[in-house]
Amino acid sequence: MSVIIAILVLGGLTLLLAVMLVIANKKLYVYEDPRIDVVEGMLPHANCGACGYPGCRPFAEALVGGKILPGKCTVSSSEGVESIAEYLGVALGAEEKQVARLACAGGTNVARNKAKYKGMETCQAASLVSGGGKGCFWGCLGFGDCEAVCDFDAIHMDEHGLPVVDEDKCTACGDCVEVCPKDLFSIQPINNRLWVACKNLEAGDEILEDCQVACTACGRCAMDAPGNLITMENNLPVIHYGVDELTRDPIQRCPTGAIVWLDQKLGAIKGRESKPVIRKSEREIGFS
Amino acid sequence: MNQESLGQIFINACLVNNFVLAYFLGICPFLGVSGKLGTATKMGGAVMFVMLISSMCAYGIHALLVAVDAEFLQLISYIVVIASTVQLVEMFIKKMSPTLFKALGIFLPLITTNCAILGLALFQTNKGYDFIQSIVYALGAGAGFTLALVLIAGFREQLEYAEVPKVIRGTILTLVIAGILSLTFMGFSGLGTQ
């Protein structure tokens, strides 16, 4: 008897639930474009957010919806972008490549520490102790948080404790921008090769005690620049990219070499007027 | 019929007999999604919601089974009902709030296999709670689950910055914390008893 009851009850229950689910499935069906899955499969799955969307799937949805072009994905290889564009039948929308740039040139050979920091070996932690041990409050602390956070192996610390961005590997995902406690990184179009490699906001030569390559806000670069290419804001030169054609001339006016020309092959080039840095070893601790 | 007051039931389910830390139910999401505070809170919310729904369904099913004198079918019918409820809830959320659906992600279907939910349905039947008591019991259990998840997520986030010996990093460390937390919750035993 109980066997029959069991069969009846369970059979009835499952039938009821099945019918309910079938009806619900019909009523609550949400149409999703099948192309979204395909496009998502073509994306790199880095979920880095460089495109401005929270991940690869939302980006794929935007692509299929025609809100954005595949070139916005900076991580995909050019073939990957092409195949997506071909699949969706849209333009490439290739953007100028962007890279992360560091606004500091104060390695251990030119910038001195005012105190020795001993503790967790991260910039985030060091910056909590009165801004870190560096003489220049704005300068790079050199513990390599950016190197650690970079998923693409594009940032490496050089022998003077400064991060160097490998422009070929950099995908402009912005992780280093976020992690740097001193806000030294920014994402720049790769062809903006004229670059102010300093963030010091103090005017005057006193800063040179702490860092030989700091910007002293003398303003020569702004005065001689063509048109409005460079203006001084908050004691720092600001380069207005796109106003005028970029030339190397401004670097020749800088007495400390804070403005550099980032050459594709040679790296940062300083002007003739700037004091050459010969020292290789670390500077001693001290403060004025 | 059980005569416990509603407040007592809630405290009992949430703290004294916390589902995760005293009964050791629902350990898989406890260890799996407790890495970040944000996801832990969302997971807790989702579990609480499903607990509430399945508690109500279990009450109805139990009444039905008692009526046809087939209480031995309790376990299997609860499983069937919980699984289909979660499916239904998933479809409903997908239709009504795609944002919430995205936020919950894979957690939602995974709740189906969460033993804390089946445990809740079985406990409430064994304790003979009426409908209101069942709902309060489910809310308490859900709150307790969320509490445990949020606590351990907080610990784990802090421990990301600590220098921990290599041998106990990862799952081992989480289990150690879980053990200590569980010991701590033993301190609540006796609370709410007359």
Image (cartoon, coloured by chain):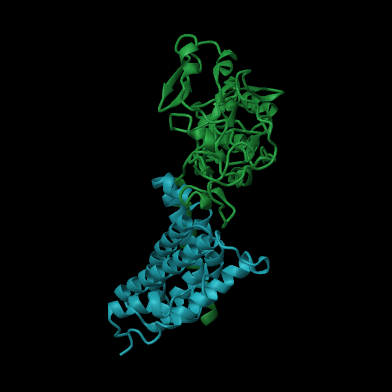
Q: Quadrant of residue A256?
A: top right
B183 sits left or right of A38 in the view: left
Residue sitting nearer the eye, A211 or A129: A211
Residue sitting nearer the eye, A48 or B146: A48
Provide residue A112's location: percent of width, then percent of height. 57, 42
Provide residue A101's location: percent of width, then percent of height. 58, 31
A235 sits left or right of B9 in the view: right
Q: Identify which residue is drawn at 47% across, 47% down.
A: A131
From this view, report whether residue A106 is shown above or below residue A66: below
Residue A5 shows up from this direction: no
Provide residue A247's location: percent of width, then percent of height. 58, 13
Q: Quadrant of residue A96?
A: top right
- Kindly give the residue lying farthest to the top in the view shown: A227
Q: Quadrant of residue A228?
A: top left
Q: Colour of chain B?
A: cyan
- Kindly give the residue lying farthest to the bottom in the view shown: B194
Residue sitting nearer the eye, A198 or A204: A204
Q: Identify which residue is drawn at 49% across, 73% down.
A: B20
Residue sitting nearer the eye, A228 or B91: A228
A101 sits left or right of B21 in the view: right
Q: Identify which residue is drawn at 38% across, 73% down.
A: B59
Total marks drawn?
Answer: 0
Residue B18 shows up from this direction: yes
Q: Identify which residue is drawn at 47% across, 52% down.
A: A128
From this view, report whether residue A214 is shown above or below residue A224: below
- Kindly give the residue lying farthest to the right in the view shown: A265
From this view, report whether residue A181 is shown above or below residue A220: below
Provide residue B162's location: percent of width, then percent of height. 56, 62
Q: Colour of chain A?
A: green
From this view, report whether residue A202 is shown above or below residue A9: above
